[in-house]
Image (spheres, helix red, strand yellow):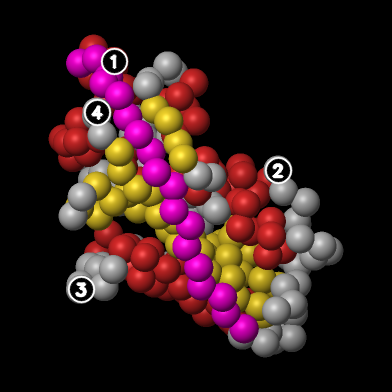
Amino acid sequence: MNWTMPLILASTSPRRRSMLAESPWPVEVLSPTIDDGDLSPGEGTPEEWVEALAWLKARSVLDVLHETREPDSPCTVLGADTICVDGARLLGQPADEREARSMLEGFMESAHDVLTGACLVACPEGHRLLFHDRAVVRWGSVSTDDLDAYLDSGLWRGKAGGYNLIERIEAGWPIECEGDPATVMGLPMRRLHELLEGVQA
């Protein structure tokens, strides 16, 4: 499948924007018009759910592009979404500090999966590719004082599972990642590089 530039990121996430800023591709950012907090996974698998969210975000930005760009203007839209899977629980961004604490305490002394779904759509052809990547994150124990200080900082806001992997590792928390760390942070960059390698502006 042929992808064309620029790459339009359908996300408001500063982490995704930062990761793509370090890539070789020209990137523009448009905010998706859906609120995934209002949606429910139903009976689908976590993999199906995270891919569906990525597609819905990409589709909402495609609708905006159809109204604001020339119909034949080439680009590739990228939608993405990240969830943590802790046992039977699918965890997105915590709604408040209480929920963030519950998520973080549940991760301690155990491992959980992090799934990031991605959707690439080539414009104007409309070719679509959906995929997901998985990483396993293992936590040790975090002291009550460290957890309280983190929650007071507000850094948990806007993050799937309530944490940023690299930020918490750099802070000295006992966390290990098996897989692509970028997947945990919101974009499966290894897979994206494989798919977009050689694409020029």
Who comes first in sequence, dot 4 or dot 1? 4
Numbered circles on residues, count = 4
- Element at badge 2? loop
Of the pair 33 and 42, the residue shown nearer to us:
42
Q: Which quarter of the picture shows residue 33?
A: bottom left
- Element at badge 1? helix
Q: For mark 4, what is the residue?
A: 109
At label 4, the amino acid type is Glu
Of the two numbered discs 3 and 1 in the rendering, the one whose residue sits closer to the viewer: 3
Per the model, the C-alpha gap separating discs 3 and 2 is 37 Å
Q: Can residue 61 be seen in this view?
A: no
Q: For mark 2, what is the residue?
A: 22
Q: For mark 1, what is the residue?
A: 146
Who comes first in sequence, dot 4 or dot 3? 3
Q: Is residue 66 visible?
A: yes
Q: For mark 3, what is the residue?
A: 43
At label 2, the amino acid type is Glu
At label 3, the amino acid type is Glu
Judge the density around disc 1: few (<14), some (14-19), many (≥20) Cα neighbours within 10 Å. Answer: few
Judge the density around disc 3: few (<14), some (14-19), many (≥20) Cα neighbours within 10 Å. Answer: few
Residue sticking out furthest to the top: 145
**Where are the magenta residues, as a range?**
127-144
At label 1, the amino acid type is Asp
- What residue appears at the point 54 percent right and 45 percent down from the top-left corner? 180
Label 1 near label 3: C-beta < 8 Å?
A: no
- What residue appears at the point 29 percent right and 51 percent down from the top-left corner? 85
Judge the density around disc 4: few (<14), some (14-19), many (≥20) Cα neighbours within 10 Å. Answer: few
Q: Looking at the picture, does residue 189 appear above or below residue 69?
A: above
